[in-house]
Each structure stands twice: as structure tokens, then as C-alpha cells.
Image (spheres, grey):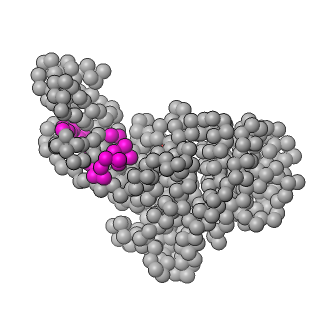
């Protein structure tokens, strides 16, 4: 359609560039386009609104793509176009202007990611590679944000401390996996800061006339920084006078640019549609930011904050050790791939937040129905579905709630469901009379940090099952990496 519109304008106006501008002036909605024509064979015209578009700047060559990894093999200098931008690109020159023709300039972003992180590097799928990259991404995300005496420092924040402490409400807004990261953040902040935190799905938030104002800090979480609903939610929050803080992976993305404050995750390029390492680094930033507030408002002693941080810095080593041998989990997954007709993921407290992510990973790449429930809700409905062939993954990593989870396990076993417990290593409370299988994860000193470790076997479980079923793991059917339309 758009091409025909341009052609139509061109037949009247003559000049190609003016015709493209005229055509775009008459269209609405989301687009990012490149126009090539034999009228000007050495030129690419491009423009964007709502959908992402980047230009890679090379030596006597330039590139256009929707995302940075596509051009990383050729250049490390990138221009990120903003809504309403128009570009005329030749091998030697990039001219930027507004749609109406006014000259503009955009900052050139240096890409610091390693090229190998945008390639498979010997792994059969990006997803497995990205799961294995998680220890390194945690280290990268912590780097420069922890002092030698184990305090949190977030130099990129421009907040005055007084402003940071003035918010009486925190609202987290995101979609999908990023929303699940927000759910972990809620548990942590409420536990640590004793402040109410609500977490909302962006597509609901934007149309709900949200209850936010100048006393609210709205934390927007997004890997891509381009998710249409999340971006619209950010704009809505700003309109209502809230202060916005974005936790984003892609540098220079729309959400990063528009939020009042940005804390980047350093996951590097995440290629697999199913998010793993981005989720991991979102958790790290959420934990750091919570500890930062606690520290700045003197809510807890320096020793307590330092103990959390010490625990955080141990995670990469523990995770890397765990990832060295996952053969037992692989074997279990292959069995479950043939015996499970559907999955429930149960947990309490922060384990419930992780269950949500486990269920999403499972359904997204294995195409097996999977649902997360707060474990206490089992009796209030879903138990009716438990029978042979239904696998129930019970997360029991929270010491205070462990016995409660054991009683859920028994309920599942009594209905002939397949009960699989996810527990901290050295757990002696379970054997094959109580459960069908046990998945051990490394432990942390603070239970509230367990999501960082307990999510890894859930990611792998989904991966191995999807692999056994021959699914298209990196590009699951019907899904896109960046959801830039509503
Ligand atoms: O780029 P974003 O973090 O904003 O994306 C949000 C969701 O679309 C994303 O997390 C999606 O749920 C993933 N495919 C889950 O693995």
C-alpha cells in the first residue's frame, strides 16, 4: 500500500524524496521503512514512527536495520532514529531530517557488545548459549555499581536522594518476562523497604486511567526498550506527573530515551525470542536499586546491605558451577517431554514469581500448556485438573514456606500427578516416596535472592523439553522478539 502511495505521489511530484515525505505525511500508525528505487539507485531513504530503525555507520558504507545485532559484524557506530525521523543514506553519507525536512542530528552510539555474543558460538541454539552467558551478564551488570566496601553506587542516576526518598508509591510496569522480573522486585522491595509496590501489565496499565501521580515512582522494565504497550505506559505515567525509571537492555531505545532515569542491564544482545539473560540482569538491577534505596534511607545497617551485596557477588560463580553439568536435568526433561500433557508451576512468595516465569518459558518454546499458581490456590480449583500425565513443578526454595510446599507436593502425588520439587542443594527433606523427581539448585544466604538461581533449571527444563519435541526454540511460532505493535 505505502509503496503504491509513494509511486502515486511521485508520478505527480517527480522528485522521489519529496514524494516519500508527502506519502508519509498522509499515513498514520506504526512503521519503519526503507525505500529503494531505480530512480536513485545509490540511495536508501528511510523513516520511522513507533517501530525501531537503526543506521550502522561504516567506512564508505552504511547499513539500515531494525536492531543493532544485525549490523555488529560491520560496524560499532550506530545512529538510533527517533519517531518522525527521516534519513537519506548513501555509501558515504547519512543525512537526517524531520519528516517535514528540517535538518536534525542524532547522537552516535558506540556498540560495546562483543560480536561473538551475537552469534551462536558452538551452541545448538541461541537460547542455550544465552542461558550459559548468565553468570557473565550478572558480573557485567554489577560492574561499577558496587564499591569496595560493598555499598551500592548508581552513578547514572540523576535523582537527588531527597527525591528518591519522597515517593510514597512504587509501580512497576512491563510485559511478559519483564513483568515477571517486576514481580520478583515487588517481593524484594516490600520485604526490604516495607513499601507497597504494585506491578502491572503494560497493556492494562495504559488503558486503566492509572493511579499514579507526582509522588509515584514508575519503574518501566523492558529488554528491547521498544515494546509498544510498555512505551505507551511510560508516556501515560509521565502525563500523570509520575517520575519514571527505565530498566532497559537496549541502549538508545525509545524507552531508554524517554524515561526520566535509566538503569541499563548489561545482558548484551539477546537473540532468542524467549528471554533468559535479559530477565536475569533485570533481576540484578532491581535488587541493586532496592538495596540502593535501603542504603540511602538508612533503613538498614551498612553491614546488612553489605551482606546482601556479598551474596549477590557470589551468584555468578555458583551459577557457572551449576551450569557445568546439567545432564541429570536433561535426562529428567526428556522423560517429562513424553509423559507430560500439561504443566503447573507452583510456588509461594518469591517462588511464585519465579513459577510465572517458568510457566511462560515452558509454554512459549515447548507449546505445552503451562500455568503458574500461588501454591496455596491449588485447592481452590486447579487441583481438579491434576491426574496422571499432569506435571506439577513445586518450587520450595523459601525456608519459611518449605513445609507448606511439602503439603502441596503430597496433594499432587495423591492424585497421581507427577510431582517435581525444585529445592536448594543439600535438601534432605525429600525422597522418591514424596516426589517423583527433585531438581537441586545452588543456595544463597538470603532466600529472597533465590530467584537468580532457581529460574535457571526452569529455563533449562523448558529448553530441553522443547528440544526433545523438536520445536523451533529460538523463534517459536507466532511470536516476535520485539513486540512493537499493540
Ligand atoms: O522487550 P521487552 O522486555 O519489553 O519484551 C516484553 C515481552 O514481550 C517479552 O518478555 C516476552 O514475554 C518474551 N518473549 C518472554 O520470553
What is the residue that sits farthest to the left in this orientation? 14
**How many circles with numbers are drawn on the protein?**
0
Q: Which of 342 and 161 is in front in this view?
A: 342
Instruction: Measuring from the top left, give residue 254's x and y in whole percent.
Output: 34, 48
Q: Quadrant of residue 86?
A: top left
Q: Please tell me whether residue 482 is drawn above or below residue 247 in the rendered image.
A: above
Q: Nearer the viewer, residue 306 or 58?
A: 58
- The magenta-colored residue range is 65-90
In this rendering, would 357 be left or right of 223?
Answer: right
The residue at 56%/35% (across/down) is: 472
Residue 2 on the magenta span: no
Q: Nearer the viewer, residue 266 or 349?
A: 266
In this rendering, would 415 be left or right of 29?
Answer: right
Instruction: Measuring from the top left, give residue 135's x and y in whole percent.
Output: 54, 61
Residue 68 on the magenta span: yes
Instruction: Measuring from the top left, give residue 175's x and y in whole percent.
Output: 50, 45
The residue at 18%/49% (across/down) is: 105
Q: Can residue 384 be seen in this view?
A: no
Q: Quadrant of the C terminus?
A: top left
The residue at 63%/64% (across/down) is: 321
Q: In which quarter of the image is residue 94?
A: top left
Q: Can residue 426 be seen in this view?
A: yes
In this rendering, would 242 be left or right of 376?
Answer: left
Q: Please tell me whether residue 73 is drawn above or below residue 157 in the rendered image.
A: above
Instruction: Measuring from the top left, give residue 131's x and y in whole percent.
Output: 56, 53
Q: Quadrant of the N terminus?
A: top left
The residue at 36%/70% (across/down) is: 155
Q: Please tell me whether residue 331 is drawn above or below residue 247 in the rendered image.
A: above
Amino acid at each position: 500500500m505505502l509503496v503504491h502511495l509513494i509511486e502515486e505521489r511521485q508520478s505527480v511530484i517527480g522528485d522521489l524524496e519529496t514524494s516519500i515525505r508527502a506519502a508519509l505525511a498522509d499515513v498514520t500508525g506504526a512503521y519503519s521503512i526503507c525505500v529503494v528505487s531505480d530512480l536513485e539507485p545509490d540511495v536508501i531513504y528511510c523513516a520511522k514512527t513507533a517501530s525501531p530503525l537503526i543506521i550502522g555507520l561504516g567506512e564508505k558504507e552504511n547499513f539500515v536495520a531494525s536492531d543493532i545485532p544485525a549490523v555488529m559484524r560491520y560496524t560499532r557506530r550506530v545512529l538510533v532514529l527517533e519517531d518522525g525521523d527521516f534519513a537519506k543514506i548513501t555509501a558515504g553519507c547519512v543525512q537526517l531530517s524531520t519528516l517535514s525536512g528540517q535538518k536534525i542530528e542524532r547522537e552516535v552510539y558506540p556498540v560495546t557488545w562483543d560480536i561473538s555474543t551475537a552469534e551462536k558460538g558452538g551452541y545448538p541454539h541461541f537460547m542455550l548459549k544465552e542461558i550459559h552467558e548468565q553468570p557473565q551478564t550478572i558480573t557485567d551488570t554489577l560492574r561499577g555499581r558496587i564499591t569496595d566496601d560493598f555499598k551500592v553506587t548508581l552513578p547514572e542516576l540523576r535523582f537527588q536522594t531527597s527525591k528518591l526518598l519522597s515517593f510514597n508509591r512504587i509501580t512497576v510496569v512491563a510485559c511478559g518476562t519483564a513483568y515477571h522480573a517486576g514481580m520478583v522486585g515487588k517481593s524484594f522491595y516490600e520485604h526490604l523497604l516495607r513499601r507497597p509496590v504494585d506491578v502491572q501489565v503494560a497493556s492494562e496499565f495504559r488503558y486503566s486511567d492509572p493511579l499514579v501521580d507526582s509522588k509515584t515512582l514508575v519503574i518501566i522494565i523492558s529488554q528491547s526498550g521498544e515494546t509498544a504497550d510498555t512505551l505507551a505506559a511510560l508516556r501515560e505515567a509521565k502525563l500523570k506527573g509520575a517520575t519514571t525509571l527505565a530498566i532497559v537492555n537496549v541502549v538508545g531505545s525509545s524507552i531508554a530515551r524517554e524515561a526520566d532515569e535509566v538503569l541499563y542491564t548489561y545482558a548484551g544482545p539477546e537473540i532468542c525470542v524467549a528471554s533468559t539473560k535479559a530477565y536475569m540482569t533485570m533481576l540484578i538491577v532491581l535488587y541493586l536499586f532496592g538495596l540502593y534505596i535501603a542504603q540511602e534511607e538508612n533503613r538498614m545497617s551498612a553491614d546488612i546491605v553489605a551482606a546482601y551485596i556479598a551474596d549477590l557477588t557470589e551468584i555468578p560463580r555458583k551459577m557457572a558451577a551449576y551450569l557445568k553439568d546439567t545432564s541429570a536435568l536433561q535426562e529428567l526433561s526428556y522423560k517429562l517431554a513424553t509423559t507430560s500433557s500439561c504443566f503447573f508451576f507452583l510456588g509461594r512468595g518469591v517462588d511464585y514469581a519465579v513459577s510465572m516465569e517458568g510457566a511462560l518459558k515452558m509454554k512459549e518454546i515447548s507449546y505445552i500448556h503451562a500455568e503458574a499458581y500461588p501454591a496455596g490456590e491449588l485447592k481452590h480449583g486447579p487441583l481438579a485438573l491434576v491426574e496422571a500425565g499432569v506435571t506439577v513443578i513445586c518450587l520450595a526454595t523459601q525456608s519459611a514456606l518449605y513445609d507448606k510446599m511439602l503439603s502441596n507436593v503430597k496433594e499432587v502425588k495423591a492424585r497421581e500427578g507427577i510431582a517435581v520439587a525444585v529445592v536448594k542443594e543439600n535438601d534432605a527433606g525429600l525422597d522418591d516416596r514424596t516426589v517423583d523427581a527433585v531438581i537441586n539448585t545452588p543456595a544463597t544466604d538470603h532466600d529472597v535472592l533465590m530467584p537468580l538461581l532457581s529460574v535457571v533449571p526452569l529455563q533449562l527444563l523448558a529448553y530441553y523439553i522443547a528440544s526433545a519435541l523438536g520445536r523451533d526454540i529460538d523463534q517459536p511460532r507466532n511470536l516476535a522478539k520485539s513486540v512493537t505493535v499493540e
